[in-house]
Amino acid sequence: MDSLITAAARALAAGDPLAALKRVALREDPPALALRGIAMAQLGDLARAKVLLRSAARAFGPKEPVARARCIVAEAEIALVSRDLGRPLQPLDAARATLESLGDRVNAAHAGYLEARRLLLVGQLDEAERTLDGLDAETLPLASRVGYELVAAGIAMRRIRTKPARAALDRAVRAARETGIPALSAEVERASRAFDAPAARMITRDGNRLLRLDEVEALLSSDALVVDACRNIVRAGSTVVPLANRPVLFALVRALAEEWPQDVSREALLTRAFRARHTDESHRARLRVEIGRLRKTLGPLAGFDATARGFVMKPHRAQKVAVLAPPVEGDHADVLALLADGEAWSSSALALALDVSPRTVQRALEALREAGKAESFGRGRGCRWLAPNVPGFPTSLLLPAPLPNG
């Protein structure tokens, strides 16, 4: 490798893409194309970066498998940054296997970290953790180690484990400081702000209160009966009852939990569960049926007694009842929560992360744009969505992951 290529690679490793471009901007050989692609990615021109890296991969060809695999890994990282999450992982898996078999442990580990990062973004936490655990973090360069620790922190945060999350963030801070790269320090700072920001809202009869992640963890570890509106489940201790596919039952139990220990009128329950403006005897009959289903479904956790004006929740063992909700609720809050991370998302990536249909996401995005809460740029498959600065935006920390089991 000639001296200009070596100097450009060192500049990129130090986070100085302009210095790298000064050395290889006019060259068209494969190593120069690859370095120019990485430089353009660091400067934010992801479309141009992708074209250059693909050209470099083709130019390297099968006779230089290590260099070609490195280009594939770099392109996969660009796909993650641009939230192109629908891309299959097979090329990245194959590139990682090639790098491992040919002795490039550093870039193989970086490819593994990218796999874990993508799995985290789409909420596959078990797979992300297994991938991360299979890596030797010591083989990663400092810049990649920052990302490794941020993924570890992200997994812990979504599983509501504050101590491991804080420890991973502290390690990321130290690694970013050692690199001296401002962009990495800024990324760690954003993650730290997300850790310290309100993660949820606790609703009781006494009012609402925003909770930090450690407070959410303490609530879930307590003996309280928690109606979790972030995941549509009800839990007390280690007993968890999912109600994501039973929206009427969840609406009823949430209404009853918000007023506990008082009862809730039949009219209020009908409005919350069935959105009935005018009630008649058929609505009341249906309410009795649904309360019966609720008693059966949540029998291990609570009873539901009739009163003169409605119904009241009677927890079996819990001394406290609380509703755990996102900091901001409303139409399409889950989509807005993902957009609020500051990155540009494609609609297909949002659908993948939320496990809903692309059409559902597209309708939500159009509604958010009409409300001034989202904006788009590009066309067709290149269309990306952003959230402008929306005060009080909801957090994505509690979106895709299952609750801890105790």
Image (tube, grey):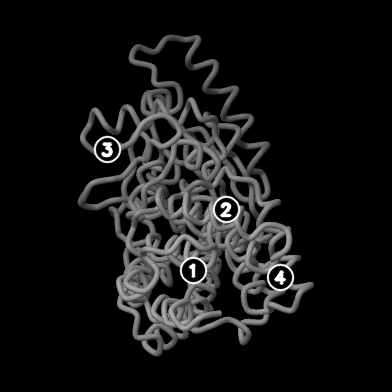
Between tags 1 and 3, which lies in front? 3
Residue 69 in the image: above or below residue 388:
below
| Image disc number at residue 217 | 1
Q: Name the residue under label 2.
A: 123
Amino acid type for the residue under numbered disc 2: Gly
Any part of residue 105 in sight: yes
Secondary element at tag 1: helix
Q: Is disc 2 in contact with disc 1, using a CB cutoff of under 8 Å?
A: no
What residue sits 42% from the left and 23% below the top? Answer: 270
Amino acid type for the residue under numbered disc 1: Glu
Q: Going by the picture, which residue comes out furthest to the right?
A: 101
In primary-sequence order, the first of circles 2 and 1 is: 2
- Is disc 3 surrounded by few (<14), some (14 to 19) or many (20+) residues within 10 Å? some
Any part of residue 222 in sight: no
In primary-sequence order, the first of circles 4 and 3 is: 4
- The quadrant of the image that shows the N terminus is bottom right
Q: Mark 3 points at which residue?
A: 375
Q: What whole-number distance in Å separates the C-alpha atoms at marks 4 and 2? A: 27 Å
Q: Name the residue under label 4.
A: 99
In primary-sequence order, the first of circles 1 and 3 is: 1
Q: What whole-number distance in Å separates the C-alpha atoms at marks 3 and 2? A: 24 Å
- Is disc 4 surrounded by few (<14), some (14 to 19) or many (20+) residues within 10 Å? many
Between tags 4 and 1, which lies in front? 4
Residue situated in front as seen by the camera: 166 or 328: 166
In primary-sequence order, the first of circles 4 and 1 is: 4
Between tags 4 and 3, which lies in front? 4
